[in-house]
Image (spheres, helix red, strand yellow):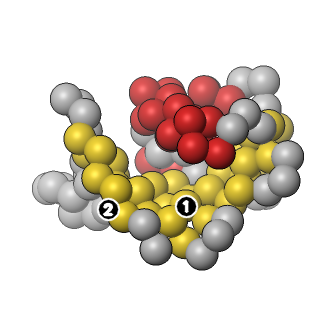
Amino acid sequence: MLFVGITDWRFELKIQEVENRGILFSFEDLNVEPYNCMTNVYVVIGANDYYICDTYLGPLYMKKIKAYLEENYGSKNYIVFNSHSHWDHVWGNYEFQNSKIILTKNVDIL
């Protein structure tokens, strides 16, 4: 298991490799009042695709994740799926306009 902390002038991103195909990206931006929660983006590395579960708070965050993936694992297609429609799970979908985005029946904001 690899744990890397990347500090940017706007946010801190923690990266944890899970086994040989998973990566957990954790953000603590919302770990303050009134939210008090950590938010995660999970990526499964496939042979030809990256499968991304939830896209957090916008393109800035997802650009960092995409850069990390492409730097360390190469260029692949992106397939995004959202667990639900809360703003802290879908705003980063904007960064994947040319990718497949899979939504559950209850995700209706896009």
Disc 1 or 2, which lies upstream in sequence? Answer: 1
| Badge number at residue 11 | none
Q: How far, Cα to Cα, is label 1 from label 2?
A: 16 Å
Q: Residues within 10 Å of mark 2 (few under 14, many from 20)?
A: few
Indicate the position of residue 85 as horizontal and vertical percent values.
59, 51
| 20, 60: nearer the viewer | 20
Quadrant containing the C terminus is top right
Query: Is residue 21 placed above or below 26 in the rendered structure?
Result: below
Whether residue 65 can be seen here: yes
Residues at circles 1 and 2 in contact by the CB criterion of under 8 Å:
no
Name the residue that disc number 2 marks. Answer: 38
Query: Is residue 68 placed above or below 5 in the rendered structure?
Result: above
Q: Is residue 67 left or right of residue 77?
A: left
Indicate the position of residue 79 as horizontal and vertical percent values.
77, 45
Quarter holding residue 97: top right
Name the residue that disc number 1 marks. Answer: 23
- Disc 1 residue type? Ile
Viewer-nearest of discs 1 and 2: 1
